[in-house]
Image (cartoon, helix red, strand yellow):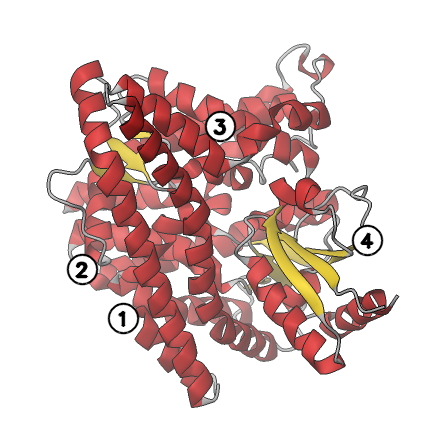
Amino acid sequence: MMPCVVLALGLIFRLPFGRAFRAGLTVGFGFVGIGLIINLIFGNMGPVMESLIRDTGLRLAALEVGWPAAAAVAFGTRVGALIFAVGILTNLAMVLLRLTRTLNVDIWNYWHWSLSGSLVMVVTGSLWFGLLAAVAHAVFTLKMADYTAPRIQAFFGTPGITISQGFAMANMPIIMPVVWLVDRIPGIDRISADPVAIQKRLGFLGQPAVLATGLTVIAGLVARQPAGTALRLGVAMGAVFLLLPRVVAILMEGMTPFAEAAGEFMRKRAGDRPVHIGMDCAIGVGHPTNMAAALLMVPISLLLAAILPGNRLLPFGDLAGTAYFSVMITPWTRGNLVKTMIVGIVLKATVMYMGSDWAPLFTRAADAAGFPLPEGAALVTVFGNPFAWVCVRLTQLFF
Amino acid sequence: MDTRKRILIVCGSGVATSTVVAQRVRAILDQSGLEADLRQCAVMDAAHEAKGADLIIATTQVSADLGVPVINGIPFLIGVGAERLAAQIVAQLKQ
């Protein structure tokens, strides 16, 4: 469906037919590629996870698949097919009505709004409720982006820009109060940690493919697979981490012509109003504190998954995505690594519980998006987005 | 001297914005008749990949001391200042 949507949107934005067609086709190829990788994951990890759960009593039955797969799911549902039109119209309407100063230019960001919408659609069985949730998330994101713009611009040195990414903005209601509390811990300002030194020592944790291979081999051995099998599984899972981003790049390549045209369109229609250009939190990833925090979050995520009572989410895909997680924390802790880690742990635990909680829903959404899981496979999930989770829980009260 | 220049395009993930920037850079190279090898990588790998690069274009923060000139690629993403950035890149490559 998305390839047709991309083709149609390309034509609406007056791209030449050949270009729009090729773009749509490229997006289709990207989806096929992602489907292949997801099957690769379950073909290999499924049996290992089942043995692990059976033999060691691990209750971590929901495999966290990471943001690329989550984006593919979010774009693959009916809400996903409509999210570009809905998102662009919502943003433009809000700007023209002076309800926001943020113009979200990064089309890839729409997958977060679509995830909220898709999950609500799965709960309610209604496309309209799903779209409503997506719009609500969009409105929330844009308002929050307005609010956080001054701090973001000052800290990252990027004038005129803000971050209008759905996951990052949904975390702000948690981040801001926790930072406030952490600032009041007696003596907290006297502890320091050097981000650069940590990057040097722990750099290996930033190699997701190698890490995935190592962890899978260990998991395989713990699940009592023969060494040869464990090694083969390890290489397969490392390959997933190498291949998945490249396949997602294909998907993004297909979306780029339309994305650029849409960005132009929005800028023109916004007229002379002063706007913040809303981007993805990737622009803040390279800050030294964030990079150090990203490395530290890898073992911490796994530890949290093991010790948090009632959690069933097994971090996996996120191992490659920890860099995005703490970007929004750093401006509020002014780059202080210790405070960032404390806030990060609280946030991670929260979104882990949310992701664990909605795993059955996400699995159904994946199915609705055209990524059915093999029979008897464990659940799949992704780390919770607080706004989406609240929407889901609210609608579950009524449906 | 005909050794091709090597441009490293750095973004948060190595796939998202760096793909957009890579497409733009290819167009710029075609237009100005220059040749260069393009590589994309995530910022985590930037220190390692920077060896052998002649120019880095980044859409995220990068530590300045990689021994290679770093140009901010964000104008390509937001559409403001894109022409100036293109000229900057061409000038850098012609050095």
What residue sits 23% from the left and 51% below the top?
Answer: A365
Q: Chain of mark 3?
A: A
Q: Chain of mark 2?
A: A
1 or 4: mark nearer the eye? 4
Q: CA distance from mark 3 to mark 1?
A: 35 Å
Residue ID for mark 2: A126
Front-lying residue, A46 or A278? A46
- Please say whether residue A390 is visible from this viewpoint: yes
Residue ID for mark 3: A298
x and y percentages locating residue A177 in the rendered image: 53, 29
Evaluate if marks 3 and 1 touch, with contact meaning CB atoms under 8 Å apart. no
Evaluate if marks 2 and 1 touch, with contact meaning CB atoms under 8 Å apart. no
3 or 2: mark nearer the eye? 3
2 or 1: mark nearer the eye? 1
Could you tell me the amino acid type at mark 3?
A: Val
What residue sits 70% from the left and 32% below the top?
Answer: A334
Q: Do the dots labelled 3 and 2 sit on one chain?
A: yes
Q: CA distance from mark 2 to mark 1?
A: 18 Å
3 or 4: mark nearer the eye? 4
The earlier-in-sequence mark between 3 and 1 is 1
Mark number for residue A1? 1
Q: Do the dots labelled 3 and 1 sit on one chain?
A: yes
Query: Badge 2: how crowded within 10 Å, few (<14), some, or many (20+)?
Result: few
Q: Do the dots labelled 3 and 4 sit on one chain?
A: no
Residue ID for mark 4: B69
Could you tell me the amino acid type at mark 1?
A: Met
